[in-house]
Image (spheres, rainbow, N blue to C red):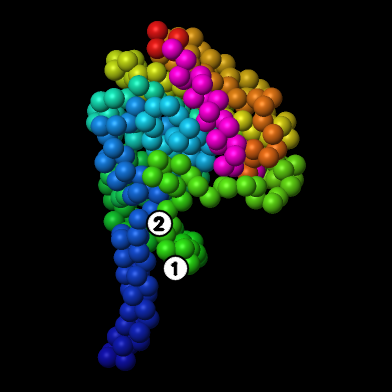
Amino acid sequence: MKVFIRKILVFIIPILIVWAVLECFYKTVASNYSYKHRLISENYDDIETLILGDSHAFFGINPEYLDTRAYNLSNISQSLYFDQLLFEKHIDSLPKLRNLIITIGYYSLSQLPNTKEDVWRKYFYRSQMELDVPVIGPFDFKKYSLSMTRRFDKSVSLIHTYVEKGTIIGCDATGWGTYYENTNGGVLDIESRVTAKRHEDFLFNFEENISRLQSIIAYCKKIHCNVYLVDMPVYEGYLDLLDSNKLEKITKSCSDLAINNSNVMYINLRQDPRLEKSDLYDPDHLNHKGAEKYTKIINTIISDPKNDD
């Protein structure tokens, strides 16, 4: 019996040590989630423009080029589900908020909660951004252990990045994503096929996400805050591979929100003729040059005095 117990311990103890190391890493090393949560909390009294959305906002809208004091609370693969949770958590602490920018991509309005990237990211929103996340069940043990939420090789890769760079934070103090500096060296037409296939969910039901936007818009109307729904520019070859019927429905849905709400503007830059290949990191993300260019374009629009009428 003692031999059996000893063998069990020899097997279990290394696993427990690895688990403890990973758990310590996730609990103590600052990530985009914990870093953004800390900084927005420290700057509540100054923020006039809040930016929400997924990676298109994270890499594409740089608060440095907005006239108002802005903070970018977007994140990679951040769905409207989490945009709404973040908005509801912080809105009552932002006394100077005048503008809310939310990016809308091809999959934004059809994306279901608790799918794809949300499967593991939801635990980080809960643990590191102090959100109450309803899709996490009361008996889900992963909410108590971040090391259990990701594949082991992903965790090891993240630790390697930390050892190499001294940080895993990928944004600056304004929340803007900083590591899409130039282009990724790929061929845009080839990448477009891969990206378009990855983004296609074959879903046309926008009801849930439109409801989320309407809830946000209604609250913003009460506090005299303008809402800007921004469809960011993408590579033409990528756009051509997307479902034209879905694109048309996205345009109509956002346009209807703007028509029916006096505090909403839809800024559709999806096929903007000013876009150059040198502005792109990949088919659907801007690089640093593109982010500066298009943030300035957005700034010109939201700074127009007519939008305050």
Residue drawn 45% across the image and 9% down it: 306
Q: Residues within 10 Å of mark 2 (few under 14, many from 20)?
A: some
Return the residue at label 2: 149
Camera-nearest residue between 306 and 12: 306
Which span of residues is magenta-colored?
282-305
Query: In the drawing, does residue 281 fall left or right of residue 228?
Result: right
Q: Is residue 297 magenta?
A: yes
Location of residue 263 in the rendering, given as x and y in whole percent from the top left corner:
40, 13
Amino acid type at circle 1 is: Val
Q: Residues within 10 Å of mark 1 (few under 14, many from 20)?
A: few
Query: In the drawing, does residue 174 fall left or right of residue 177?
Result: left
Quadrant location of the N terminus? bottom left
Return the residue at label 1: 163
Picture quadrant where residue 118 is located: top left
Camera-nearest residue between 113 and 221: 221
Picture quadrant where residue 261 is located: top left
Residue drawn 46% across the image and 20% down it: 302
